[in-house]
Amino acid sequence: MAGSKQIIEADVVLIGAGIMSSTLASMLKELHPDISIHILERLDAPAAESSDAWNNAGTGHSALCELNYTPEKEDGSIDVKKAIKIFEQFEVSKQYWAYLVRQGLVDKPEEFIHTIPHMSFVFGDKNVDFLKKRYETLTKVHFFKGMKFTDNANEIKEWAPLIMDGREEGEPVAATRAEWGTDVNFGALTRKMLKYLIFEKGVVMKLAHEVKDLKRTQDGRWKVAAKNLTTNTKIDFYAKFVFIGAGGGSLPLLEKSDIPEGKAYGGFPVGGQWLRCTNKEVIKRHDAKVYGKAAVGAPPMSVPHLDTRFIDGERALLFGPYAGFSTRFLKNGSLLDLPGSIKVHNVLPMIQAGWDNLDLTKYLINQVSQSQDDKVEALREYFPTANAEDWELEIAGQRVQVIKKDEKEGGVLEFGTEIVNSADGSIAALLGASPGASTAVAIMIDLIHKCFPEKVATEEWQSKLKAMIPSFGKSLLNDKELFKSEHVSSSESLGIVSAPIEVI
């Protein structure tokens, strides 16, 4: 009956039906087959926000081409620590996806992952020097041994003709190329995981169900108050563990939980837009993900790239993303999201972070004020002969950059992802943006350690985790032979190209 209330008990409630919740649900179900899991999604389809192919970069983020993961230090050297970490995390994701394919839980990997070369491309003497140093530093590590570098314009044209067509002769240019890069449709992968999960005993997914409140009960469980948006029925879920994996919507829900650990955070929304190519002949001529250098003050999600994608069985070519500003925390969110997230405990950190990131503010103002012609001019830095008539604007997803309370600086704008969990591990939320989806498996392993410490210490869970992820508990960086074997094995199972192992 409309307006009535239901009560449902479950071991686990997952809020949001995106790549994070589907990854955690599948891992928990493998580790604990008898567990009961309810997945609640506000929209009427899963993976429709940040996990959707049009709403994220789709790059299997492995630091092969993303220059923001390898900053230049004051002494001129290149810091590759973050690149190494992200590369290894993506390899862990691939191992788990390969396990799901081998177990017959996920089918047709060609529908969610493709081989596509990853390239970095720069112009100007200073940037050419930077890219060469980056290449020389990265290729000392076995993860990146097969990468190629050139500052020869003709060779770059062979790799990616669009970026060289019409370029001024003699302009200093350079590029790196990794043939074993990937394009991942995280929306398709999410839907494949949920497709098998909903037929597993004890797993229920409820679409068009919005979580309105979270409260701790006297017996230590969580009461998750939700509303069926179709029937207006109110439902109270009682769960031992709650995961908030709602993308930009995670911060407001974390605040509703009222856990002390959540009071150190605020959020700043950044929107995105693409230019999407409509000319099939142009699309055919480009076969790479080409990443450039971000503008000063730009957030990581705004690193420019001319990007071959595979979306719903179709080859696509995008350029961007262009940043935008909205007070919404989700693409389908409310204009009141940002003001509603400002609380007594985070207002000063948010003000301080804003003051310390004036370059970002200026960048966003510039981006918002750009016309379509301005956007095409930015495209022509990477595709000089681009015809404006071949491109149309596509609205991408919303991201919420984390603002974290800091004792010394007041508030710090964090780029990346972060797990926030209660001291007893009964509730956790994932905040942040890139590289997010690509490193989902590693993030969920970290969450499982934090929230299920006693279970994960058992021989049963340890053994299962090693079956799911063969490198679990070991370092692919320190064990070159393990990296070789698992990299090749996972690539074969997923039907993608592996790195040139003979040079490692």
Image: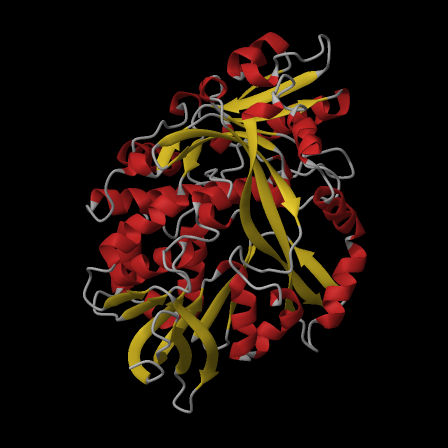
Kindly tell me whether residue 201 is visible in this rendering. Answer: yes
Kindly tell me whether residue 140 is visible in this rendering. Answer: no
Residue 388 quadrant:
top right
Residue lying at the far bottom of the rendered structure: 218
Q: Is residue 247 left or right of residue 220?
A: right
Measured from the top left, where is residue 369 in percent x and y? 74, 43
Residue 341 quadrant:
bottom right
Q: Is residue 489 left or right of residue 73?
A: left
Measured from the top left, where is residue 454 in percent x and y? 36, 72
Measured from the top left, where is residue 489 in percent x and y? 29, 35
Write the residue at 71% across / 11% down.
Answer: 168
Write the residue at 73% across / 71% down.
Answer: 347
Q: Is residue 409 left or right of residue 100?
A: right
Measured from the top left, where is residue 246 in percent x and y? 47, 62
Write the residue at 26% across / 51% down.
Answer: 467
Which one is in front, 323 or 141?
A: 323
